[in-house]
Image (tube, helix red, strand yellow):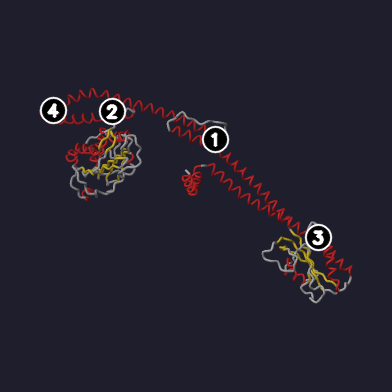
Amino acid sequence: MIGRFLRRLARLPARLPRGLLRAWRRSITLRVVTATLVLSVTVLALLGQLVMRGVRDGLVDSKVSASRAQAAAGFASAQSRLEAAGTPQRANVGQLLTQIVTALRDQAGSSSLYELVLVPSPTVDADVPAGRLRIATGGVRPASVPAAMATALADEPGSRADRFVSICYGGTDEPCAPDAPRLPAFVVGTQFSVSGAGSYQLYFLFPMTAEAKTLDLVQSRLALAAGALLVLLGAIAALVTRSVVQPVRSAARVAERLAAGGLAERMVERGEDDLAKLASSFNGMASALQRQIGQLEDLSRLQQQFVSDVSHELRTPLTTVRMAADVLYDGREDYPAPAARSAELMHDQLERFEALLAELLEISRFDAGAAVLEAEATDMRTVVRRVVDGVEAMAAAQYGSRIRVEEPTRECIAEIDPRRIERVLRNLVLNALEHGEGRDVRIRLAVDDEAVAVSVRDYGVGLRSGEAALVFNRFWRADPARARVSGGTGLGLSIALEDAHLHGGWLEAWGEPRAGAQFRLTLPRAAGAVLRESPIPLEPVDRRGPRLPPVPGPHHAPEQDPEVARDG
């Protein structure tokens, strides 16, 4: 059991795409919900980008304005302190600048609103006592200030510069390492001079940690809202689609039951909307179909009853007429030539009339469902031989054709009704002789484990496109103007098809113009079994003439020249 579970689990990745594809093809709800979610995700992503961009731009603009104002106030405070200090002693410059930076940092309080960096100007003389002075608060590295910004301030003394940078921490003068943690910040700087001590640059660094947290918070809230909205949209799309698809599914189920014969099935009508109109129209159509089918069934029953009654009623007078016709036929040699010929014609037509009545009675039994299958285990080779023995003489005398049989050496046992199958094969062979244009007729018998098949092949006029589906219709003829030699009734193939269906088998036809035709009868070897395939292909290998050599057998004639068989 565990092994079976593991095998199923291993096959799951291969089956999953097929299952999803099958569900995609079959489910309108899945396609609508998926399309809704895809479009919603696209729209929400665009709206989210627009919202985030607006929030980010607003936060940045606000931060820049506040930072510039705060830095301007700090620069003014530092300048006033320098002016108040006058000209400091060179040894006290470092102490003075440190006091100024500390005082400015204390104004920010404990909120870390900004940090300060004070460095000498790139142009200051290193021999000045404070030339190597570096002051930074909050552990910020002075190297966080870009060298390009320091150079720009040195080129324009008294100016101010600002830009966005990434600051790093460490409290040393070493440059920031490439993998050191960095924080986004807005830097505002200026350069000022100290009497007797050179020029220095003061930078206000405003970390944007709060703004980054605000953006993260807005982004998480937007993602949460988008997820909830997607779930809501998916549920709404599923509900709306279900409300539309459910009546369609109901109509499909009702249509299937109607097709299965449940003509009283109807859809439920609710409301007055378009779906209610659909249900009303569908029910109206079903009612009209029920009436028409009922009328057709009544007419069919009347026709079947009429045919059955007429066939039975005609048998008694036909028997009397037949007796009189036999007397006249037996004494035709004593009559004048015109009278003798009339007796022969009457005899022939009465035989045809009797055959027609017999086939009409058989058709009426099939229509009434009264046909009974008397199945018994039979070797199909025996049935084929009986059929060939019965028509071989007529084939040579009336049609100038030979019958070739190809059969296996093994037994072809199947549970069949020999009388009915013999009638089917006789009809097929006579039909092949009738349309074979005097060429050979080839009968092939094959068997496998589940089915036995017989094909009857002629090389005559063949069938045009679409006629293979019509040959089993009652009284249908490929060429109504063509004279019959055997005087068939037009019901033989129809009865043959019914006999094949009674056995649970197939009777199929193939044909091409001037290439002949082939009829294939396939029967299950066991009565009641379901056919899956036939041992003989429906389309023959020799589509343009007999190409296979005959298999030795009791009914095989010498091989005919292919050119003669093809061209006549």
- The residue labelled by disc 3 is 70
Q: Earlier in the sequence, mark 2 or mark 4?
A: 4
Location of residue 228 (image quadrant): top right
Mark 4: few/some/many CA within 10 Å (<14, 14-19, 20+):
few
- Dots 2, 3 in contact, CB < 8 A: no
* Secondary-structure class at tag 3: helix
User: Residue 9 location in percent, x, y?
Assistant: 49, 47
User: Residue flagged by tag 1: what amino acid is it?
Assistant: Leu
- The residue labelled by disc 1 is 275
User: Residue 33 location in percent, x, y?
Assistant: 57, 44
Looking at this view, name the residue that lies furthest to the left: 334
Relative to residue 42, is residue 325 drawn left or right? left
Marks 4 and 1, how far apart in space? 77 Å
In-front residue for pair 36/436: 36
Q: Earlier in the sequence, mark 4 or mark 1?
A: 1
Marks 2 and 3, how far apart in space? 113 Å
Q: Which mark is residue 330?
A: 4
- The residue labelled by disc 2 is 361
User: Residue flagged by tag 4: what amino acid is it?
Assistant: Asp
Mark 2: few/some/many CA within 10 Å (<14, 14-19, 20+):
some
* Secondary-structure class at tag 1: helix
User: Residue flagged by tag 3: what amino acid is it?
Assistant: Gln
Q: Is residue 523 above or below residue 107?
A: above
